[in-house]
Amino acid sequence: MLREVARVLADDMKKRVVIVDTSNEIAGDGDIPHPAIGHARRMQVITPTMQHAVMIEAVENHMPEVIVIDEIGTELEAQAARTIAERGVQLVGTAHGNTLENLMMNPTLADLIGGIQSVTLGDEEAKRRGTQKSILERMSAPTFDIVVEIQEWDKVAIHPDVGEAVDALLRGNQATPKLYLFGVNRGRIEQVAKDMRLSPEVVGSLGEADLFVTSKAYYRRKPQKVSDAEALRLPVYVLRSNTPAQIRQLLDNVYPRAGTEKQNRLKTALSEAEEAVGKVRGGEGSVELSPQSAYIRRLQHLLAQRSHLSSQSTGKDPNRRVRIYKG
């Protein structure tokens, strides 16, 4: 996919494309670059630890309009990516993680989608928002405007506004796509959704829709509505049949509920840390929290720091936990 993106941008869009090729997986390791990248240029990286430096060198010395980079994985590379984006160069990169949430939970890569910080609200503001006092917020504008999740060989999920998607996840909300149904039984979808405790939003025009849903039988005929949806670049979801099982699979894909469960765990962990801060301020020597992942522990440390208290992680994974105390 990355090779083809580089080729299309260089050959079809006539842009100056530079590929920062660390392990030579994109453009090959020979003296002549792989023909699949078209007229894109290649900059090989002598050692992986220098990848961030080569990224910056590409911008400063080669006047690219686009830089393509595979596997952004370190803090220095994430910083270099932000520098490139701030200089107005289009950046196409990959990072390990199956979903947008994976990036949010990765302390090293979180900056790519704006970074996450713990913020303590005043009593009135927390009451107005209907939230607890300690909440998570995005720190800055994302380095990347768009995130594409490669879910399967021929299936991707696109977040066209990363900042908006991250904010929705931090609020505990899944973005609710609006569905346009064509040749699909609306009543059956609403019944299955009710059983799953979901509330899908079905719209009556393509202009309002985020997803075009049709059946395999209708899609094969290629009617005008399908052509119109594709012309508008609407994602098209094709049901093999109008059965409840197929509709349930559609709703599971469109409205994943695992993210909400993760957010609930996150909120519980931060509430526990907030309560511990109150106890320590009230006179307790120290309070030990429940075991958490590295990302959540980092946020708990942040919360203690903002409350002018000390904290440290103790124990070994999976039982590693944070202890909050007066410094």
Image (cartoon, grey):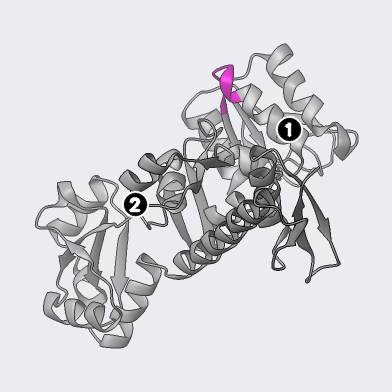
Q: Which residue is mark 2?
A: 130
Report if residue 17 is visible in the image: no
Q: Which residue is mark 1?
A: 20
Q: Residue at x 29, y 47 (%)?
A: 233
Q: Where does the magenta region start and end?
A: 85-90
CA separation in Å, label 2 and label 1 = 46 Å
Q: Residue at x 47, y 46 (%)?
A: 166
Q: Residue at x 59, y 53 (%)?
A: 274
Left or right: where does residue 194 sit relative to residue 112? left
Q: Nearer the viewer, mark 2 or mark 1?
A: 2
Few, some or many residues within 10 Å of mark 2 (<14, 14–19, 20+):
few
Question: Which one is earlier in the sequence, the residue at label 2 or at label 1?
Answer: 1
Observer-nearest of 144 and 129: 129
Element at label 1: strand
In x, y percent, where is residue 283? Answer: 70, 53
Element at label 2: loop
Left or right: where does residue 189 sit relative to residue 150? left
Type of amino acid under label 2? Gly
Q: Are marks 2 and 1 in contact (CB under 8 Å)?
A: no
| Outermost residue, left side | 204
Q: Is residue 322 above or below residue 19?
A: below
Total marks in image: 2
